Amino acid sequence: MVSKHRWQSPTMLLVLMSIAMPVAFNAWTALLNNFVFERAAFTGVEIGILQSLREVPGFLAFTTVFVLLILKEQTFAVVALALLGLGVAATGFFPTTYGLYFTTVVMSLGFHYFEAVKQSLALQWLSTDEAPQVLGRLISVAAITSLVVYGVLWVLLEIVKLDYVWNFLIAGVICAALAVVMWIGFPHYKSATEQHTKLILRKRYWLYYGLTFLSGARRQIFMVFAAFLMVEKFGYSASQVTLLFLINYTFNWLFAEKIGVLIRRIGERNSLSIEYIGLIVVFTSYAFVENAYVAAILYVVDHMFFALYIAMSTYFQKIADPADFASSAGVSFTINHIAAVIIPAALGLVWIHSNAAVFLIGTAFAVCSLALAQNVPDRPAPGNEVRVGRVALAKKPA
């Protein structure tokens, strides 16, 4: 369908999606720990179970392709956003262990399905030339939205003294309302290529799968253990950790689009190499840091390097059969979340004996990523997916 207004475009729809998701998800993240402790008397056991349950839908993201047998992809993305909003809106009304487990699963289903489908839609709707910059712009939009969300939450909690129930409700309803706007206000945009509605795993995508798995492993170490180090070892308060998050989001707002332009200029292999070399230095430094200010700098720099992950998406866009985008988005999310299910629990046991060892394991993951990244060709394309270990394209019947 052709849009009636200039603002009705696939890019604008992606922008609205990039606003709606962090409104709900970041509010949930910011409020959750205090809420479960104060209202549901959670201990480490219950919060650990809740966080594991939250990751299960990400691990099951490959089922996206089966949902697409029933719903069109754009419709599925909007429905997933609405589900995310409803899960967050309901959270404050169920201050019990099983109630919070339930609302967390609902929220997480919406979040993970949305993220998988949004990536697929972006790769379908954007050309390979514009994708790096536009994907960077979407990260910037999400970052400034996050800054606004954290600022408004602080006012509502500290100045207005608004109860948790209403904070969860407001954030969730805004997300769901934006989903309704997307449903009503935008036409359905067709992909140039009809998407496969079956599970796709291709041998020639092996390098992308490997980089995706290692990215999930590294990200879990950063998300779970880097912030915990700031609290446990250096005594950072909740407000100080929040300040670090604000610095991170400010960086994304200011520079993510520029990073996209850089990736387009220097190519995926060089971009990924810069990221992984930087992470090797950062993780190794985490292992031995003794100064609280240096640790804070490492935390911000660590987050900065992750913005270069755009290069993985654009690499896949260039090598993949366009009909594989929808199926492969769910598969890659599942591969990424294999580490999310395993890493926190396994390295939590290592942490008890040595937090330095945890970060040195992160260094090892980054070294493996750097080695794999050297196999990305100068001009990725179908049939030219890797420099070494190429798998022949299957011949289609005449």
Image (cartoon, grey):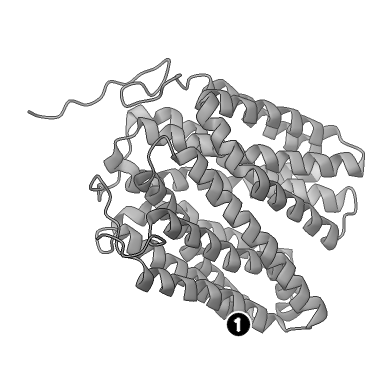
Where does label 1 land, which residue? 94
- Residue 355: image x %, image y %? 80, 40
Reply above or below: 316 against 97: above
Residue drawn at the location 38% of the way across and 24% of the way down: 385
- Where is residue 293, by image quadrant? top right
Residue drawn where x is 88% and y is 48% of the image: 233
User: Nearest the camera: 148 or 109?
Assistant: 148
Say which of 53 and 366 sits in front: 366
Which x, y percent locates residue 110? 47, 65
Assess disc 1: are there few (<14), some (14-19) or many (≥20) residues with their C-alpha within 10 Å of its C-alpha. some
Tell whether 395 sits left or right of 160: left
Residue 218: give x, y in percent of width and height: 63, 39
Residue 90, given in percent of the width and then of the height, sits at 56, 80
Q: Can residue 42 be seen in this view?
A: no
Residue 189 vertical placement versus 88 (above, below)? above
* Residue 326 left/right relative to 84: left
